[in-house]
């Protein structure tokens, strides 16, 4: 007999009208039956599949879809090209593989496989997670939907789950890339004693919706705090990629790309500039370069690019970073604890036994 989970998927897909999942479940059952040498049953299922056209929706839609759930997302026209991104080797290779899997999905389905479509990106802010998601949408020519948490998370019991249902029902209507930024906002660990029962119900419902999404909807979730995610949420994602801060070589390439577009090139080399910046994100390096150009432009020809760069590097030393804030908070908490008077417990006098 076929595996129970395949049969359950078959029934669910049939009632939901999800033809893509229906075909995938049927093909998985065929593979199981052939592995057990039940070739007659497998042949009959394959013939049945051949008589019913079960194709996914077209990869692109000429008109934007409207309906319940549309207000919980923002559609952004993807402009970032994957080849323009500066990524670590694992992220670059996995990204290219993901695009190929969806472009050649028919080849995979012929062997009873589906392209991966649930991806988790983790790492500190400003290192390309959002750009990666946008580049995947651009590379596949798909709509790029960004989830709006302000429209998704409700104040009343069950309201968030109802909006989540409408969101996922909407994205099922067409191939697309659905992007959850700051995913830890709704995917938190259910064992956290500080969280309410409502967030636990939201996480459970979210897991169910992720399991039921068809492969032509690519869900990409990004988080700066992977340690806060529920362990079951981690398991749902088929591809988990890390986006650390760039190493020295990648930072030099990034700076060179920016500075080559300036009308005047500073005397300081990108190698030396990268060394002065130290360990930073791409976003921080971009901010510095933009501030240099702003200072030079406002100087109206009286400030050279070298002077502007020297001034910004001087200010760079005193910038505030999250690590600095954490250290200040820790020092403040320690000082408050030291200043707090210690509690003393008055000892009761020993009771003298009668007749002593």
Image (cartoon, helix red, strand yellow):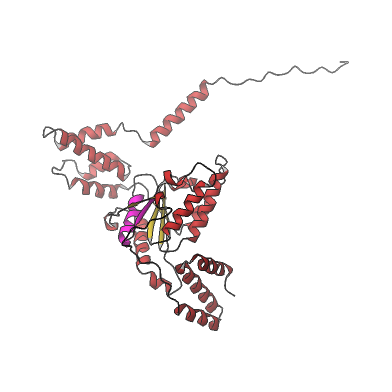
Quarter residue 33 falls in: bottom right
Give whichever of 134, 83 is nearer the camera: 134
Q: Is residue 272 visible?
A: yes
Q: Is residue 188 visible?
A: no
| Percent x, y of residue 173 | 41, 61
Location of residue 112 with respect to 245 vertically, above or below: below
- The residue sitting at the left extreme is 301
| Percent x, y of residue 101 | 38, 66
Q: Main secondary structure of the magenta part?
A: helix
On whether residue 134 falls in the magenta region, the answer is: yes
Horizontal relation, residue 298 to residue 288: left or right = left
Location of residue 184 with respect to 30 vertically, above or below: above
**Dividing the image into 4 quarters, which one contains the N terminus?**
bottom right
| Percent x, y of residue 254 | 25, 48
- Say which residue appears at 55% left-offset and 39% top-offset: 194
Location of residue 291 with respect to 348 vertically, above or below: below
Horizontal relation, residue 204 to residue 332: left or right = right
Give whichever of 253, 30 is nearer the camera: 30
Horizontal relation, residue 99 to residue 31: left or right = left
- Say which residue appears at 54% left-offset and 52% top-offset: 204
Query: Where are the magenta residues, as a range?
Result: 128-147
Horizontal relation, residue 264 to residue 188: left or right = left
- The residue sitting at the right extreme is 355
Instruction: Tally the marks.
Output: 0
- The residue sitting at the front extreme is 67
Location of residue 38 with respect to 158 vertically, above or below: below
| Percent x, y of residue 234 | 49, 53
**Dividing the image into 4 quarters, which one contains the C terminus?**
top right
On whether residue 54 falls in the magenta region, the answer is: no
Give whichever of 140, 231 is nearer the camera: 140
């Amino acid at each position: 007999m076929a595996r129970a989970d395949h049969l359950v998927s078959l029934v669910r897909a049939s009632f939901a009208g999800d033809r893509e999942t229906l075909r995938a479940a049927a093909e998985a059952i065929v593979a199981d039956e052939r592995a057990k040498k039940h070739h007659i049953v497998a042949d009959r299922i394959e013939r049945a599949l051949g008589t019913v056209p079960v194709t996914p929706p077209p990869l692109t839609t000429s008109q934007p879809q409207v309906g319940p759930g549309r207000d919980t997302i923002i559609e952004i026209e993807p402009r970032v090209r994957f080849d323009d991104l500066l990524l670590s080797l694992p992220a670059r290779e996995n990204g290219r593989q993901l695009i190929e899997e969806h472009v050649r999905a028919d080849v995979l389905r012929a062997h009873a496989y589906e392209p991966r479509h649930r991806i988790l990106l983790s790492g500190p802010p400003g290192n390309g997670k959002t750009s990666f998601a946008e580049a995947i949408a651009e590379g596949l020519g798909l709509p790029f939907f960004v989830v709006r948490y302000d429209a998704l998370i409700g104040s009343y019991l069950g309201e968030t789950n109802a909006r989540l249902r409408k969101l996922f029902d909407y994205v099922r209507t067409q191939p697309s890339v659905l992007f959850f930024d700051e995913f830890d906002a709704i995917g938190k660990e259910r064992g956290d004693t500080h969280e309410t029962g409502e967030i636990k119900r939201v996480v459970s419902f979210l897991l169910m919706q992720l399991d039921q999404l068809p492969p032509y909807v690519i869900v990409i979730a990004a988080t700066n705090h992977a340690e806060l995610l529920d362990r079951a949420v981690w398991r749902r994602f088929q591809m988990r990629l890390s986006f650390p801060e760039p190493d020295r070589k990648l930072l030099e390439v990034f700076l060179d790309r920016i500075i080559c577009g300036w009308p005047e090139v500073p005397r300081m080399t990108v190698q030396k500039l990268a060394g002065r910046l130290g360990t930073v994100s791409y976003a921080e390096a971009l901010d510095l370069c933009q501030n240099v150009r702003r200072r030079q432009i406002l100087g109206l020809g009286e400030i050279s690019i070298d002077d502007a760069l020297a001034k910004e590097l001087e200010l760079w030393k005193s910038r505030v970073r999250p690590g600095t804030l954490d250290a200040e908070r820790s020092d403040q908490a320690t000082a408050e604890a030291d200043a707090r008077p210690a509690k003393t417990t008055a000892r009761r006098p020993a009771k003298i036994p009668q007749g002593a």
